[in-house]
Structure formats: C-alpha cells, structure tokens
Amino acid sequence: MSVTYNNNDGKVIIDKEVIKKIAGYGAKECYGLVGMASKNKATGIVELLSLFDSSRGINVQIEDDLVYIELFVIVQYGTKISVVANNLIEKVKYDVEMQTGLKVKKISVNIQGVRVSK
C-alpha cells in the first residue's frame, strides 16, 4: 500500500516500505535501543534483528492519509524503558513527518525484550 498526494509540481507516491525504512533509521539513533525484534510464529521466540535491516520489526498502516506505526524493539538493560520509548516516539515521528510530509497519528512501542551487555 502507498499514499498518494498532489502538489504544485505533480503527483507524489510514497510506499509503505519507505516509511518503514525512515522509521527504522530514526529508531536506531535512539539511546538505549539494542535492536528491532521479530517473533518467530512457529516457535513463539523473539529474535534480535540486525539494525542494518531497518524495515523489519516495524508495522505501518496508512488510513485517510494518516500514518500509524508500530515498533517492536529490544532495549538495553539498565535504561529507563519509558524514557527510551518516549525518545523513540519523538524521533520516529519527527523523521517520518519531516521526510514525507505525512501526518503521524500514532506510534506504538512494543518492548519485546531486555538485553544485558557482556
């Protein structure tokens, strides 16, 4: 799915995958984030995804030109989860709105795990 809008110069089409990548790159800059998470449907085990694949662990829905983003993340042990989540929300919202011109209506952060550094 994509979103389409017209401006003075023509038509702009933004694919959902582009929004996922923008959100992923913004998220990986946030302090306390270890990586994105994905749940294996067969085993139910959550796995840590590489930060280089920035579109996995992110769901994007577009309804009435409003963007809804859901992030699945693993945070660093010892960080305050509420602070990490708020930073993620602010950074991802800012990046998506500034780079696409779309309005982000809601961002949900799902903490899938905590990683203890070695």
Image (cartoon, helix red, strand yellow):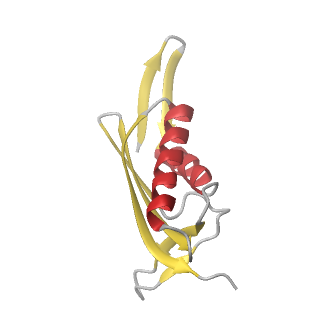
Give the x, y percent position of residue 49. 59, 72
State whether residue 74 is above or below residue 103: below
Give the x, y percent position of residue 41. 40, 80
Q: Residue at x 51, y 60 (%)?
A: 84
State whether residue 118 is above or below residue 108: below
Q: Residue at x 40, y 66 (%)?
A: 110
Q: Nearer the viewer, residue 109 or 46?
A: 109
State whether residue 86 is above or below residue 48: above
Residue at the outermost top position = 8
Give the x, y percent position of residue 109. 41, 60
State whether residue 33 is above or below residue 7: below
Q: Nearer the viewer, residue 24 or 83?
A: 83
The quarter of the displayed image where residue 42 is located: bottom left
Residue at the outermost left position = 64
Quick one: quadrant of the N terminus? top left
Quick one: quadrant of the C terminus? bottom right
Q: Residue at x 53, y 63 (%)?
A: 56
